[in-house]
Amino acid sequence: MSHDTDVFIAGAGPVGLTLAMDLSARGVRTTTAEPRRFAEPPNVKCNHVSARSMEVFRRLGIAGALRDAGLPADYPNDVAFRTSVTGTEFARIPIPCRRDRYTDTSGPDGAWPTPEPPHRINQIYLEPILLRHAAALPGVTLHNRTQVVDFTQDDGGVSVALLDLDTGATRSVRTRFLVGCDGGGSTVRKRMGSRLEGTAVIQRVQSTFIRAPGLAALIRHPPAWGHYSVNPRRCGTVFAIDGRETWLIHNHLNADEPEFDSVDRDESIRQILGVDEQFEYEVISNEDWVGRRLVATRFRDHRVFIAGDAAHLWVPYAGYGMNAGIADAMNLSWHLAAHLRGWAGSAMLEAYERERQPITEQVSQFAMNHAQAMIKARGAVPARIEAPGADGDAIRAAAGRAAYELNVQQFCCAGLNFGYFYDGSPLIAYDGEPAPGYAMGSFTASTVPGCRAPHFWLRDGRSLYDALGCDYTLLRLQRDVEVEALVGAAHARGVPMALLELDGETLPPEYRHRLLICRPDQHVAWRGDDVPTDAMALVDRLRGATPA
Ligand SMILES: Cc1cc2nc3c(=O)[nH]c(=O)nc-3n(C[C@H](O)[C@H](O)[C@H](O)COP(=O)(O)OP(=O)(O)OC[C@H]3O[C@@H](n4cnc5c(N)ncnc54)[C@H](O)[C@@H]3O)c2cc1C
């Protein structure tokens, strides 16, 4: 049976769109079904695009367009801790505005080893940019108002059943692979028999998206992107969405407030903002959500995969659900492309679940632990945190130190960006040295196979990542090291491998070997001082043709 497409993607959220973009760059045809109308906005939820995701978007050619959107160019991305949004400020995590993002290195994430620092932009601005870019790419077909309702698969491919939401008509499409990027309620996940497991409810949050043109004028401190409102009556977080008049308010319900409507929404908003009953605002939408920690039992069933929220859901501390989903997409994309181009071994398709599932489990634990620490902190707000004078100042100073220490690791989460490593992958040639551990806010750069290749700038001003090939890249740190046997073995197996000469470059100290192979997703696949005697065995390992 012939195939209508190579990869069918259920869902044009940020993860599905990123997958479509990267597959297009690899010459793979995709078809995407999305129930929303073209450019119909998503929920106003995600605000943080990680450095790692921006590195991906840089490679896909849209980092600039994303960086130019969101908050006004000079609007600080700081996080402020106050007694209410209009109250007294007692701590601030400095994060540069997007105008200064590449040059201001003074803040806690300013000196990160990346060509693309993090970016703050709400999903309602992010998605239209991804969508328009993806829709214009070669090989990308998008069907709006279309829902995946079922699938069946056999050795040759997958038949996907689609429902046209406008006409009610159903039809079937034949594809080589199906990827469910269809969000938390994923039909694909359910139909493939995978279950979400973990903690179903950590926290209920009553969230409201408002328009309040008068709020900014009442704030007595410099603008901030994120605001923690800390007082004994009602704690909440507030995010600036357009940097002018729209705000997203999260009212974190307490354990004795089990329903979204357990507390008066308007009264809570006024407590969090610190405004009286005369203050006017308009509710744009209610965005209530449950903080969870759930990871799917399986990410793959033969030719069917799930990625993003379809595969994992966790409470958005550190703002990492979408970012982890983008990392899923970038991992799966080149595995599928390698298979379709005919150079992958059978373990290539196994690698996605074996590499990504443990990472999402780790990130989910970091996020849940942070959620529990925040629940504890909200239950221990000093009664006199709003007191005037020296007494109140001392209480606020202590609270500010604690709030900064606890939260800098989530807003500047270096470990989540750069620290994770693929352990036990069938595609990586390990050499016995253990990868360094990481925490949410910290990591140790390393070239241990499985780690992200430490970033550095080349003499000609390019980022290392800009110089890497689309597939594997062999980094040669000394020009006289013989590499012909390895390049020849890759060629013989049809594995694309570019050679990057780094002799004379100033490299970080982690680069201790004379040779290193970087994967398409910038993780280290192998390192050594010389090409191994059996170069073909190494190439077979990288392409998933060696039993793990
Ligand atoms: C309050 C809040 C704040 C957050 N902040 C951040 C943050 O700062 N950073 C971050 O990284 N993450 C954040 N997240 C998480 C982030 O919003 C999600 O992880 C992200 O949207 C997941 O993207 P996705 O593409 O996997 O799924 P979704 O965004 O849910 O997209 C799924 C798509 O699939 C479509 N779909 C559904 N069913 C079907 C079907 N049967 N067939 C075809 N298509 C279908 C949907 O219409 C939708 O377009 C936050 C979440 C919340 C609740």
Image (cartoon, grey):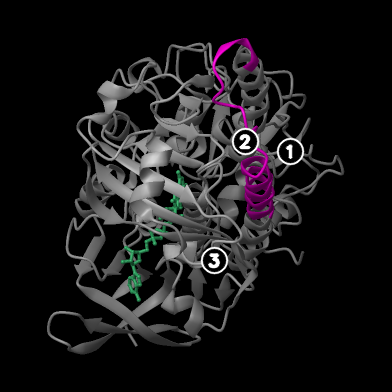
> What secondary structure is marked by label 2?
helix
Q: Nearer the viewer, mark 3 or mark 2?
A: 3
Q: Name the residue carrying label 3.
A: 258
- Relative to 429, residue 183 above or below: below
Q: Name the residue carrying label 1.
A: 438
**Separation of residues labelled 3 and 1 (CA atoms):** 34 Å
Q: Which residues are magenta?
A: 362-391
Q: Judge whether residue 453 can be spotted in this image.
A: no
Q: Is residue 366 magenta?
A: yes
Describe residue 483's horizontal placement relative to residue 12 as left or right: right
Whether pointer 2 and pointer 1 mark residues with C-beta atoms closer than 8 Å, the reply is yes
Q: Name the residue carrying label 2.
A: 418
| Mark toward the start of the polypeptide (2 vs 1) | 2
**Quadrant that contains the C terminus:** bottom right
Q: Residue at x 54, y 33 (%)?
A: 411
| Mark toward the start of the polypeptide (3 vs 2) | 3
- Relative to 274, residue 166 above or below: below
- Which label number is shown at residue 446? none
- Crowd class of label 3 (few under 14; some 14 to 19; many from 20; radius 10 Å): few
- Crowd class of label 1 (few under 14; some 14 to 19; many from 20; radius 10 Å): some
Q: Position of residue 365 (x, y in %)?
A: 69, 53
**Separation of residues labelled 3 and 2 (CA atoms):** 37 Å
Amino acid type, residue under disc 2 in the picture: Phe
- Relative to 216, residue 171 above or below: below
User: From the Cβ of disc 1, is ligand 1 less than 8 Å away?
Assistant: no
